Image: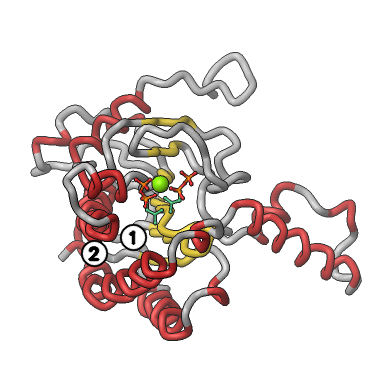
Amino acid sequence: MWKKIFGGSKPAAEKKPSGMNPIYDRINWQRLPRHVAIIMDGNGRWAQSRGMIRTAGHKAGVKTLKNVLKAAIDLRLEALTVYAFSTENWKRPRPEVDFLMKLFSEYLLKELEEMNDYNVRIRFIGRRDGMPEGLQRQMNEAEELMKHNTGIRFNVAANYGGQDELLRAARSLAKKVAAGEFSAEDIDAEAMEQELDTAGDPPVDLVIRTSGDQRLSNFLLWQSAYAEFYFTDVNWPDFTPECFVDAMVDFAGRDRRFGGLTNK
Ligand code: IPE
Ligand code: IPE
Ligand code: MG
């Protein structure tokens, strides 16, 4: 159904679509971000504050992700990138890491079909080769299944680090120069972006981080160059579509100047 109604990847909606959930009444449809990135933080704190084990928070966070992806689709955003596992998260205790890997695998099994029905184009960013083999296979299959979809670009950052991504890009460019495909002078912003895991996506307009900490934690270092930042104390499992709308409303009021004197 969604494919028919909202097919096509296009810039943020120009006018309010009819028949929408009233939670979207506060949206300024002319001033939506094209690309939103989310640092889904605070699962552990959410669980611990309820006397539960940390992993219960990760489980609850999956439900939030599902709801937020739907909201992003409703709002016809072009791209949503979520931070699921960083290159630094391997430092966590083995049982927590194992739990997360299993959770990703279950998420893909359960959600794939519905995402495809919603015309979502999933892509995994980060170092896939560091992930468990079975999961790598699932990731490849999911991308393959949805590669021709034309709806929201949904990037899941798994074993992702912004510095690692830039190093991989630098290495790849250096190889091309060594092979004579490229001259060093031709390395410009466009060539760099082509090498990034997010190649083809618009720049990040808005970074949301839940749970109170105000840092990037190695997320989308290049892509967030001119992003707006939105921090909320709400832990990720408690982050509702209404919270997402709050972030959109806040974003609509920002004065983006990109180094100039106007927002043009
Ligand atoms: C975010 O929640 C999920 C991952 C990093 C995988 P955390 O697990 O970081 O939760 P807190 O920050 O410890 O509360
Ligand atoms: C960032 O959260 C990574 C993800 C949300 C996947 P962390 O919880 O790992 O970040 P730090 O350690 O607090 O900076
Ligand atoms: Mg955290």
| Left or right of residue 27: residue 250 | right
Which quadrant holds residue 261? top right
Disc ID at residue 67: none
The residue at the point 50 percent across, 23 percent down is 256
Would you name the residue on which mark 1 appears?
151
At 90% from the left edge and 70% from the top edge, which residue is drawn? 178
Q: Amino acid at mark 1?
A: Gly
Nearer to me, 176 or 98? 98
For this rendering, which residue is in front, 245 or 128?
Answer: 128
Percent of width and height locating residue 217: 53, 44
Tell me the quarter of the image containing the C terminus.
top right
Which image quadrant is residue 234 in?
A: top left
Element marked by disc 1: loop
Q: Which residue shows up at 29% across the image and 55% down it?
A: 54
Q: Residue 113 appears at what percent x and percent y?
A: 23, 75
**Front residue of this view, candidates 69 and 208:** 208
Question: Is label 2 in contact with label 1 (beta carbons under 8 Å)?
Answer: yes
Instruction: Say which element carries label 2.
Output: loop
Q: Which residue is mark 2?
A: 118
Farthest residue, direction top: 261
Please count the marks in the image. Answer: 2
